[in-house]
Image: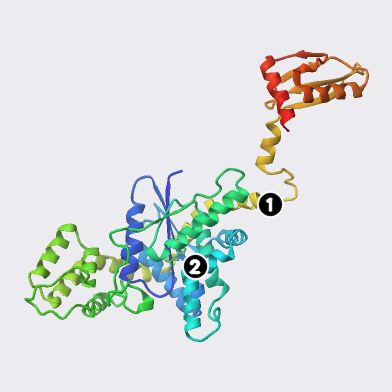
């Protein structure tokens, strides 16, 4: 199997530069690497947890799909789908729910944050917690494990979720894998250079902090307005400035080459004014984002085309998910009644042992023979008048090995026969 990379974005609201720099851009770049199989999806089931406005949810999902395509995602090359088009994902979520420790979910950051907020407000700890919020990490584990992703590019804040997916996957493998790994255990991939893009106030860029720079929304005017609001120190033009720790510089870095970064820092140290620096930042971002914004507008004007692209993606994803889920259902014991086979391990164990076969021939006499695990004839008895006699010899051979001087023809090397008989003494 090639190297699989998977990422998803919750479809609430519109995307900001932090989403682009932290998730979309690196994921698209990684999808172009040779030998990489990429999965991209709209996490719209996850979005339901936070959103009770159906129209907003629908609009946001469409906008995010258009964003990824506009940002250069090639749906021919990757598997690009909506989570909610893959019914195998919620089904897998349930299988995983059944092996997930509640105690582990109690420690999930998002859940703990909701509890802390409720307690701080003098409410019951779980006042604002739906089961959806609580089991968010399990649904996310299903997203990842369903496609056996090796790597998941995420922001730092999602690392815990990937670790939970590993734990759950490992537990499932242990319980149901019969010594084989059903799931690939995923690893978080955090771009060390970018990690968390700061927002206007220097904290992580996040909708919840209301400090975002919109990606496409509002056009270049909105970009310029947002950049104008980036918090800096109050040094005047001409005064030397310390670029380190400035949100504006970190944002500049995210859209620049190493040479440009060095030059920008040198200019600030040499007294470049913040106003001028902000103009340079806008130009730097606009050079990358501007052409994408135009493609985005086109895609938003053609919902049929967008829908067809997503349907094709869902078909591709389900071609993987459907047979895999079938295998997983069988592994946990959800099987058609006609499938009376026991687990693969039990079967293998059974067939790995040598066997004695007792039978009666046309001459009316009773015989037995010893077959190796592979079905090769090791011992052949002579004929007995009584079935009981044959049975007694078999019992002695099992107990005593070849030292029981049975009336048998040795059909294989003594060492092989002895080894086969030894298996009965162990069991
Ligand atoms: N929880 C992720 C976020 O908020 C979105 C997401 C859902 C996701 N399922 C995923 C990301 C699977 C990566 C893999 O950003």
The quadrant the C terminus occupies is: top right
Label 1 packing within 10 angstroms: few (<14), some (14-19), many (20+): few
Q: Which mark is residue 333?
A: 1
Find residue 219 and report its image quarter. Answer: bottom left
Residue 93: where, in percent of width, then height? 57, 61
Q: Which mark is residue 91?
A: none
Q: Is residue 69 left or right of residue 277?
A: right
Q: Which residue is mark 2?
A: 108
Task: Identify the residue shown where x is 45% and y is 78%.
Answer: 56
- Give the spatial CA distance, label 2 vs label 1: 30 Å
Give neighbour class at mark 2: few <14, some 14-19, many 20+ (Cα, 10 Å): some
Whichever of labels 2 and 1 marks the residue nearer the N terminus, that label is 2
Where is residue 223 drawn, in percent x and y?
Answer: 25, 75
* Outermost residue toward the bottom in this view: 122
Regarding residue 67, the answer to whether it shows in the image is yes
Q: Is residue 29 above or below residue 52?
A: above
Looking at the image, residue 356 sits to the left or right of residue 28; the answer is right
Question: In the image, which is nearer the foreground, mark 2 or mark 1?
Answer: 2
On the rendered structure, is 25 left or right of 335? left
Element carrying mark 1: loop
Nearer to the camera, 357 or 420: 420
For disc 2, does the CB lie below 8 Å from ligand 1?
A: no
Question: Residue sitting at 21 percent across and 71 percent down?
Answer: 246
Is the residue 322 above or below the residue 295 in the image?
above
Which residue occupies 47% across, 62% down?
161
Q: Position of residue 160 (x, y in %)?
A: 45, 62
Quadrant in which ligand 1 is drawn: bottom left
Q: Position of residue 250 (x, y in %)?
A: 23, 67
């Amino acid at each position: 199997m090639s190297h699989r990379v998977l990422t998803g974005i919750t479809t609430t609201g519109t995307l900001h530069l932090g989403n682009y720099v932290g998730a979309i851009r690196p994921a698209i770049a990684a999808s172009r690497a040779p030998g990489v199989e990429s999965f991209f999806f709209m996490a719209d089931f996850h979005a339901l947890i936070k959103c009770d406005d159906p129209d907003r949810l629908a609009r946001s999902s469409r906008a995010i799909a258009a964003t990824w395509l506009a940002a250069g995602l090639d749906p021919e090359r990757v598997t690009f789908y909506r989570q909610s088009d893959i019914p195998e994902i919620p089904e897998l979520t349930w299988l995983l729910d059944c092996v997930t420790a509640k105690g582990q979910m109690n420690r999930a950051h998002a859940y703990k944050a909701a509890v802390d907020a409720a307690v701080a407000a003098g409410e019951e700890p779980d006042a604002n917690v739906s089961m959806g919020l609580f089991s968010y990490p399990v649904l996310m584990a299903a997203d990842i494990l369903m496609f056996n992703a090796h790597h998941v590019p995420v922001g730092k804040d999602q690392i815990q979720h990937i670790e939970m997916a590993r734990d759950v996957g490992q537990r499932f493998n242990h319980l149901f894998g019969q010594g084989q790994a059903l799931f690939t255990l995923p690893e978080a991939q955090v771009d060390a250079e970018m990690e968390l893009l700061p927002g206007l106030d220097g904290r992580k860029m996040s909708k919840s902090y209301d400090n975002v720079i919109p990606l496409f929304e509002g056009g270049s005017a909105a970009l310029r307005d947002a950049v104008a609001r980036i918090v800096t120190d109050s040094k005047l033009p001409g005064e030397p400035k310390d670029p380190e720790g400035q949100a504006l510089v970190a944002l500049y870095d995210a859209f620049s080459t190493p040479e440009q970064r060095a030059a920008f820092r040198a200019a600030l140290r040499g007294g470049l004014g913040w106003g001028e620096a902000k103009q340079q930042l806008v130009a730097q971002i606009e050079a990358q984002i501007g052409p994408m914004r135009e493609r985005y507008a086109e895609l938003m004007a053609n919902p049929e085309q967008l829908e067809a692209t997503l349907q094709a993606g869902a078909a591709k994803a389900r071609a993987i998910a459907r047979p895999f889920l079938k295998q997983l259902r069988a592994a946990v014991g959800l099987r058609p009644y006609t499938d009376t086979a026991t687990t693969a391990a039990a079967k293998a164990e059974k067939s790995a042992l040598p066997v004695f076969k007792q039978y009666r021939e046309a001459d009316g006499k009773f015989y037995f023979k010893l077959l190796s695990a592979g079905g090769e004839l090791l011992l052949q008895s002579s004929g007995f008048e009584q079935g009981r006699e044959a049975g007694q010899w078999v019992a002695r051979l099992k107990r005593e090995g070849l030292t029981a001087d049975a009336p048998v023809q040795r059909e294989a090397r003594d060492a092989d026969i002895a080894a086969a008989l030894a298996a009965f003494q162990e069991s």
